[in-house]
Amino acid sequence: MGGCLDVGPTRVAVTPFGPVGGTGAGGPCFPAFDESGSWIFAANYSGGRLTAHPVAPDAPADAVFSIGFDGSGPHERQSSPRPHQAVIDAARDRLLVPDLGSDRIRVLRPADLPDRLRHDDDDDIVVHAGAGPRHLVVAGDVAIVANELDRTASLVDLAERRELSWVPVDATVAARGLGVSAIRLTSAGTVLVGDRDADAIAALRYDADARSLEHVASITTGGGHPRDLHVTHDERFALVADQASDSIAVIVLEQGVPVEVVETLSTPAPACLARVW
């Protein structure tokens, strides 16, 4: 459907770019385009699978590739696979899918599309039991992973396909069973993680040489249930989608570290943010 976004005095048109069929699985979330813009990959949280959708104007809406996963973990919410995001790993021509339900980063090979989509369990990256990997960012040969269930962030070697270490996102916060959510990496080497237990965002310093993470700051957003976050192109601000309070917090960043909430924007139950320019 078409529409427009109201961004201050500027109105930005939103138009369809082609038919995209249904996933055929429950809970599609946090999709990703491939580098050519020809495919959308969707993690289907409730359906336990990854789907690939062509976006060419003449592509049939039912031309969907689907890969189902198996596996579980020790946590009560890990009775089945729960893929939560799709991320392009361009340097290795791979697709990374954090699977909260199985404590795995699913690794797929999309190069054979449009003929088929490949996945082999032996290619997956296993993280520590009960972690619940939700979202990740790629930093060179390392992925930094936000683990929802045990409130940690993991460093994963993408070349060697193994977890290097993990640290608490914020050890001072008492768990309320909500866990952490989205993750972003700034050019200053600051990792920002949504913390739903504290209604805050946490900042961790990533040392690429030492391959280490250290918590440096946390700031409450003034809202509730920070489900997603993004950083402006100039990295002066973080925008945090507080789903439970119908608001988006605008937070000043200094060298990637959040220091102050300067504005709150009202919008119904924001769950996902994307930059359009």
Image: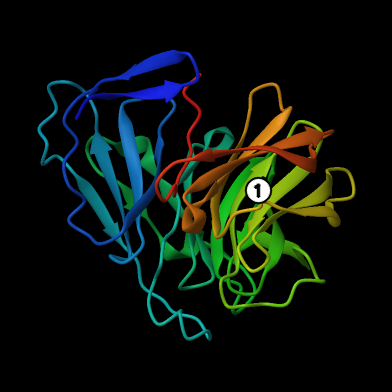
Which quarter of the rendered picture does the N terminus lie within?
top left
Above or below: residue 69 compared with residue 227: below
Within-10-Å neighbours for mark 1: few <14, some 14–19, many 20+: few
Residue 194: percent from the left, percent from the top? Answer: 63, 55
Judging depth in this view, the residue of 163 and 84 nearest the camera is 84
Q: Residue at x 31, y 67 (%)?
A: 46
In this image, 7 relative to 239: left or right?
left
Above or below: residue 72 compared with residue 23: below
> Secondary structure under badge 1?
loop
Judging depth in this view, the residue of 27 and 93 nearest the camera is 27
In this image, 151 relative to 19: left or right?
right
Hey, which residue is sitting farthest top in the picture? 10
Task: Give the total number of marks visible in the rendering.
Answer: 1
Tell me which corner region of the image, top left, top right, bottom left or bottom right, holds residue 170.
Answer: bottom right
Q: Residue at x 59, y 54 (%)?
A: 223
Q: Is residue 48 visible?
A: yes
In this image, 74 relative to 236: left or right?
left
Q: Provide the residue designation for mark 1.
A: 159
Residue 166: percent from the left, percent from the top? Answer: 75, 66
Residue 266: percent from the left, percent from the top? Answer: 48, 41
Judging depth in this view, the residue of 261 and 235 nearest the camera is 261
Q: Is residue 106 visible?
A: no
Residue 175: percent from the left, percent from the top? Answer: 67, 77
Q: Residue at x 59, y 51 (%)?
A: 136
Tell me which corner region of the image, top left, top right, bottom left or bottom right, holds residue 198.
Answer: bottom right
Name the colour scheme. Answer: rainbow
- Residue type at numbered disc 1: Ala
Q: Residue at x 40, y 82 (%)?
A: 79
